[in-house]
Amino acid sequence: MKILVLKQEEMEQIITMKEAIEADKEALRVYSEGGADIPLRANLNVPEYEGQSLYMPGYAASSKALGVKIVSVYPNNIEKGITSVPASMVLLDAETGMVNCIMDGTHLTKLRTGAVSGAATDLLAKKDSSVFLLIGTGGQAESQLEAVLCVRPIKKVYVSDISLDRATEFAKNMSGKFGEKYGVEILAIDSPNTVVPEADVITTVTTASSAVFDGNLVKEGGHINAVGSYTPQMQELPETALLKADLVYVDTRDGVLNESGDFLNPIKAGKFDSEKDLTGELGELVAGKVPGRDNDSQISVFETTGSAVLDIVVAQKIYENAVGKVGVEIDI
Ligand SMILES: NC(=O)c1ccc[n+]([C@@H]2O[C@H](COP(=O)([O-])OP(=O)(O)OC[C@H]3O[C@@H](n4cnc5c(N)ncnc54)[C@H](O)[C@@H]3O)[C@@H](O)[C@H]2O)c1
């Protein structure tokens, strides 16, 4: 059995953000049309080492994508000088069931998560969007930034975080990496609310437990991607923004309506009706089954909690691009 092993640098060489965005659109379309088998995540506790190991399997026939992402949470690893959240993606050949590739799962998560916001922005933001506000400058922020820069003619990016130092450092690094490439100015700011009224696109990617900006200030025609809230206790999207949105989409109903405080809190308070007020899944929009933006004054919101379907379809694309070009092949 031959297994291709791919490191982050090799993955970066052989897939562009644009390709990842298109792969995510396809993954969500297939998911929404019932063409993907995505079982519940299996969680194993390893109390002896205070660890937890999570297994996220999936199969999408149309992409021949079959695999499992393994993510572990081992807080004590930090004392050993290694990551506390190691992650790997294991891909199988759908025709034979043989493992054919192992790749860096942390990089895959960043890529497919940035790309899903890129997909939503591509499908929903006004075509002439030029000002982008990114709130949260942690591990996921870089791919969130690049994805939006890829799909809209952004000229100015404001970045904000509860740690101004982190936002400032991020703005400096990203100016070096993307400033010239995308012809964009990237500035750290102290308070997001000063620029919310001018932002065409807003992405929140934080670990916050309450709204990270004032939703009343969102401009007509604005588009919001909310990425960080994956438990009922976490919330970053202001309720006011959700309630004033004309168009509301999720990556998966199952994930968002069971896990995200951004939706569960307004639903619990009787202010948001998941039947009536939710426009649909993004995959339904890709498939043309629900309406999209039809004028430049509508406000749109996209919420993602992530899904294994994004992992397997993007990973399969990376594998197909990589074969014979990059990586190390091992024979077992
Ligand atoms: N939707 C998905 O598929 C998906 C995938 C991966 C990660 N995530 C989630 O996205 C979130 C961010 O991930 P990360 O790896 O970048 O985390 P991280 O811990 O590296 O960074 C989070 C950043 O948010 C900032 N922050 C926290 N509260 C804030 C607030 N109130 N206002 C402004 N900034 C605030 C922190 O200072 C930090 O810089 C996490 O909740 C993570 O679980 C979602």
Image (cartoon, rainbow, N blue to C red):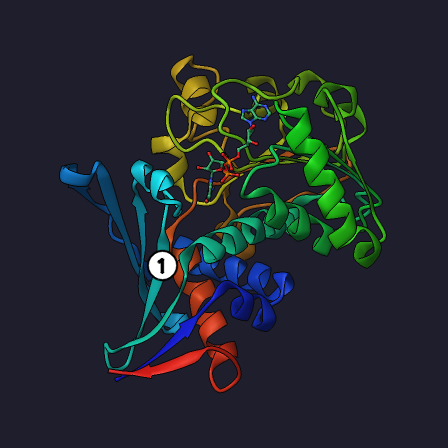
Amino acid type for the residue under numbered disc 1: Ser
User: Quarter of the image containing the C terminus?
Assistant: bottom left
Where residue 258 sits in the image (x, y, percent)?
34, 32
- Which quadrant would residue 138 be assigned to in this image? top right
Q: Which residue shows up at 58% across the image and 59% down it?
A: 21
262, above or below 1, in the image: above
In the depicted view, which residue is nearer to us: 73 or 244? 73
Q: In the picture shown, does residue 159 fall above or below 53?
A: above
Give whichever of 324, 203 is nearer the camera.
324
**Residue at the image position 84 percent from the left and 55 percent from the top:** 180
Position of residue 48 in the picture relative to residue 124 (left or right): left
Q: Quadrant of residue 164?
A: top right
Vertical placement of residue 143 versus 302, above or below: below
Q: Does the residue labelled 1 lie within 8 Å of ligand 1?
A: no
Q: Is residue 207 visible?
A: yes
Q: Tell me how many marks there are.
A: 1
The residue at the far top in this view is: 269
Q: Residues within 10 Å of mark 1 (few under 14, many from 20)?
A: some
Residue 249 image offset from top left, x and y in percent: 53, 39
Where does the image place residue 273, in percent across and percent down from the top left?
Answer: 44, 24
The residue under label 1 is 88
* Residue drawn where x is 49% and y is 71% of the image: 318
Q: Does residue 35 appear in this view?
A: no
Callout 1 secondary element: strand
Residue placed farthest to the left in the image? Answer: 48
Please name the residue shown 72% across and 24% down the image: 218
Q: Is residue 67 left or right of residue 7?
A: left
Q: Where is residue 25 in the image (x, y as percent from the top left)?
A: 53, 58
Q: Nearer the viewer, residue 211 or 104?
A: 104
Q: In the rendered view of the protein, which quadrant contains the N terminus?
A: bottom left
Decide if residue 66 is on the left or right side of residue 266. Answer: left
